[in-house]
Image: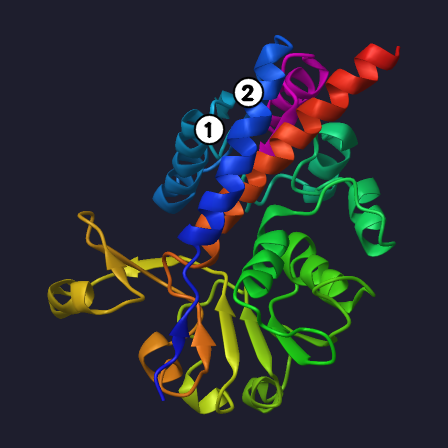
Amino acid sequence: MTAELLHGEPVAAEIREEVTHRVRELAERGVVPTLGTVLMSDDPADERFMDLKHSACDDAGVATRDVRLEPSAPVERLHGALEDLCTNPEVHAVFVQVPLPEHVSMAAVRRRIGPEKDVDCFHPENLGRLVAGNPRFIPATPAAVRRLLAAYDVPVEGEDVTIVGRSDVIGKSLANLLLQDAPCGNATVTVCHSRTSDLGEKTRRADIVVTTCGVPELVDGSMLSSGVVVVDVSANRRPADADERDTSSARSSTRSDDDGTEVVGDVEYESARNVAGAITPVPGGVGPVTLSILLRNVVLAAERQVSDRIRR
């Protein structure tokens, strides 16, 4: 069996086309949707992720305000940056790259992002609305997983889904979306994490496996059932040896970069693709769709804020 590849770019292109049209409509009203971003890390992977977001915004006509802080900076500087972005009427959306340094309270950061600008559902109010089935925004990555499954006609209703990873914004949010009585929902969902015993026993029972834990190649083919659909959310960077760099171009789910690192998912691709019925490549699967949905959320935030000002 050779797995079908669930490429994200065709799906992302459809979303970007919609976003571009809506950006033009806002421009006719004299509004440029603007995303404020905050990075408090010197990790090259985090910097690359943020650069990709800015590049995607630029291509779509979305403006950006970029704030980058040293990871050792006082937490007050981060709080101040968030206050500046959230109170600036020309900034419609705010995104904070995680993880944050250990001396920063994530809970305090969540509370400082205005809910109306919180396009990735950090604020407790927005997370609560998502769980209640009345979301202000749907976080970009869970929305991307759901959109990708729908685009490739992967049935979800009544299926067993195992999610490996329990972060608030991705793992828990996705579990709630797939549980809801809604399109691309009504699944039976199991959420696994670092304390799960016999992870393979849980993943082998699943019709769909979604990995989002950030552990390179944690799940291999022996942990999957025949014909399973595998959605690998993570893009992990690790050192690539010379042999890997020489052969990566022939592998559909590994990219080696000039800095001597390679990008791999949470799933060991070579063994998984011989078992799975369908699988996302890494990179090139969930990532492009996530970026396009983030842009759509920024535009949605701008549209709502413009409408609110008109009503006043």
Find the distance from the CA under tag 2 to the CA under tag 1. Answer: 10 Å
Where does the image place residue 273, in percent across and percent down from the top left? 37, 80
Label 1 element class: helix
| Residue drawn at x 62%, y 72% as measured from the top left | 163
Q: Which residues are magenta?
A: 74-95
User: Quadrant of the rendered structure where residue 118 is?
Assistant: top right
Q: Is residue 273 magenta?
A: no
- Placement of 298 over or under 168, stated as above or below: above
Q: Is residue 80 magenta?
A: yes
Quick one: label 2, few (<14), some, or many (20+) residues within 10 Å?
some
Q: Quadrant of the C terminus?
A: top right
| Residue drawn at x 39%, y 31% as measured from the top left | 55
Query: Are the residues tagged 2 and 1 within 8 Å (C-beta)?
Result: no
Where does the image place residue 176, in percent across and percent down from the top left? 76, 62
In the figure, is residue 299 to the left or right of 189?
left
Amino acid type of the residue tagged 2 in the rendering? Arg
Foreground of the two, 34 or 67: 34
User: Quadrant of the rendered structure where residue 165 is?
Assistant: bottom right
Quick one: label 1, few (<14), some, or many (20+) residues within 10 Å?
many
Foreground of the two, 284 or 16: 16
Label 2 element class: helix
Q: Quadrant of the N terminus?
A: bottom left
In the figure, is residue 43 to the left or right of 304?
left
Q: Which residue is mark 2?
A: 24
